[in-house]
Image (spheres, rainbow, N blue to C red):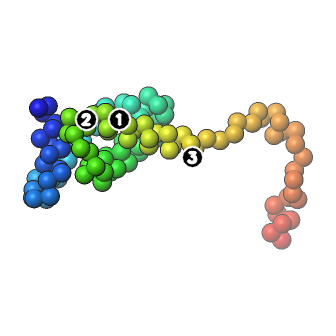
């Protein structure tokens, strides 16, 4: 049994005291936080977004932990959650790149904003 597996079992056991479950989760975050952040940063290339994703990943992992059938599968399972969260971010953040020359030469579509609010 891997060292982290007992933490998973503790978190999945509804009979464990809340303080035990909180301590187990904190230790799990301590053990896997760098891995989650590193993978998110590798995918996103942005430190702030990677930190945000890492927080979201551990929240999602905590909520979905009852669905994890095999505690030994936790590292791969968590990595998949990181991948999914990163994909969600990149899908939302995708913006069309337009060369500045195309925008600079376009006539204004509307009248000056001061005239619109007057």
- Res 82 visible: yes
Please name whichever residue, 72 or 34, is drawn nearer the observer in this view of the structure.
72
Q: Residue at x 12, y 41 (%)?
A: 6
Report the mark closest to the observer, 3 or 1.
1
Q: Residue at x 82, y 33 (%)?
A: 101
Does the residue at mark 1 contact the one at mark 2 (Cβ under 8 Å)? Answer: no
Please name whichever residue, 101 or 83, is drawn nearer the observer in this view of the structure.
83
Residue on which the image places disc 3: 92
Which quarter shows the C terminus? bottom right
Question: Along the polypeptide, which appears first: circle 3 or circle 1?
Answer: 1
Report the mark closest to the observer, 1 or 2.
2
Left or right, 74 with respect to 10, comes to right
Please name whichever residue, 81 or 53, is drawn nearer the observer in this view of the structure.
81
Residue on which the image places disc 2: 73
User: Label 3, label 2: how many angstroms apart (C-alpha)?
Assistant: 29 Å
Which quarter shows the N terminus? top left
User: Label 1, label 2: how many angstroms apart (C-alpha)?
Assistant: 10 Å
Residue on which the image places disc 1: 79
Q: Residue at x 20, y 47 (%)?
A: 25
Residue that protrudes farthest toward the bottom in the picture: 118
């Amino acid at each position: 049994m891997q060292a982290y597996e007992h933490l998973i079992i503790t978190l999945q056991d509804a009979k464990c005291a809340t303080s035990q479950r909180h301590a187990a989760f904190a230790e799990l975050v301590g053990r896997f936080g760098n891995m989650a952040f590193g993978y998110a940063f590798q995918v996103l290339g942005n430190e702030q977004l990677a930190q945000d994703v890492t927080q979201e990943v551990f929240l999602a992992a905590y909520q979905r932990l009852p669905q994890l059938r095999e505690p030994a599968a936790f590292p791969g399972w968590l990595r998949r959650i990181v991948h999914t969260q990163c994909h969600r971010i990149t899908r939302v953040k995708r913006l069309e790149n337009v060369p500045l020359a195309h925008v600079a030469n376009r006539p204004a579509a509307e009248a000056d904003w001061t005239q619109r609010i007057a």
